[in-house]
Image: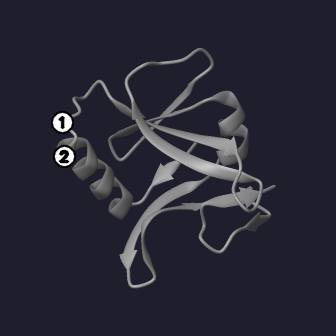
């Protein structure tokens, strides 16, 4: 399961509203090969379920993960920061043994 902080929920709600996405859309979180640590995070809005998708809901946000991504992201918290050191979504992933400095990639 992935959990979402209040700041991340607020930003996701704003992005969905600004993009004129209806309630049929959900947040797709995935992992793909690449980045300086070997694996990178990917966030997108989607409205099509795929075979093998795992669905969760936290704070009213519906989240989809494919099975491979679920194995890497179970227990992850999605946060959003907008401070002086940068702005964007952050993944607090308990499965990551190493992360890059920018927080966009990891390894297990």
Q: From where the camera sits, is residue 94 visible? A: no
Q: Quadrant of residue 100?
A: bottom right
Q: Quadrant of residue 48?
A: top left
Rendered image: mark on residue 20:
1
Q: Quadrant of the C terminus?
A: bottom right
Q: Residue furthest top?
A: 51
Residue 106 vertical placement versus 20 (above, below): below
Q: Is residue 76 left or right of residue 20?
A: right
Circle 1 SS class: loop
Between 63 and 85, the one nearer to me in the picture: 85
Q: From where the camera sits, is residue 21 visible? A: yes
Colour mapping:
one colour
Q: Is residue 29 left or right of residue 88?
A: right
**x%, y% of residue 80?**
41, 64
Q: Residues within 10 Å of mark 2 (few under 14, many from 20)?
A: few
Q: Quadrant of residue 97?
A: bottom right
**x%, y% of residue 40?**
65, 52
Q: Residues within 10 Å of mark 1 (few under 14, many from 20)?
A: few
Q: Who's the residue at 45% across and 82% down the image?
A: 85
Q: Which residue is mark 2?
A: 18
Rendered image: mark on residue 78:
none
**x%, y% of residue 74?**
66, 45
Q: Is residue 24 left or right of residue 100?
A: left
Q: Quadrant of the N terminus?
A: top right
Counting the numbered discs, the total is 2
Between 38 and 11, the one nearer to me in the picture: 38
Q: Is residue 53 left or right of residue 46?
A: right
Q: Who's the residue at 72% across and 59% down the image?
A: 106
Circle 2 SS class: helix
**x%, y% of residue 70?**
66, 37
Q: Are marks 1 and 2 in contact (CB under 8 Å)?
A: yes
Residue 61 vertical placement versus 94 (above, below): above
């Amino acid at each position: 399961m992935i959990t979402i902080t209040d700041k991340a929920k607020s930003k996701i709600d704003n992005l969905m509203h600004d993009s004129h996405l209806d309630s049929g859309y959900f947040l797709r979180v995935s992992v793909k090969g690449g980045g300086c640590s070997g694996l990178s995070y990917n966030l997108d809005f989607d409205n099509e379920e795929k075979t093998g998708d795992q669905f969760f809901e936290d704070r009213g946000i519906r989240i989809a993960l494919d099975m491979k991504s679920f194995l890497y992201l179970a227990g992850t918290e999605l946060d959003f920061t907008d401070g002086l050191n940068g702005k964007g979504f952050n993944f607090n992933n308990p499965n990551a043994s190493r992360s890059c400095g920018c927080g966009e990639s990891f390894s297990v």
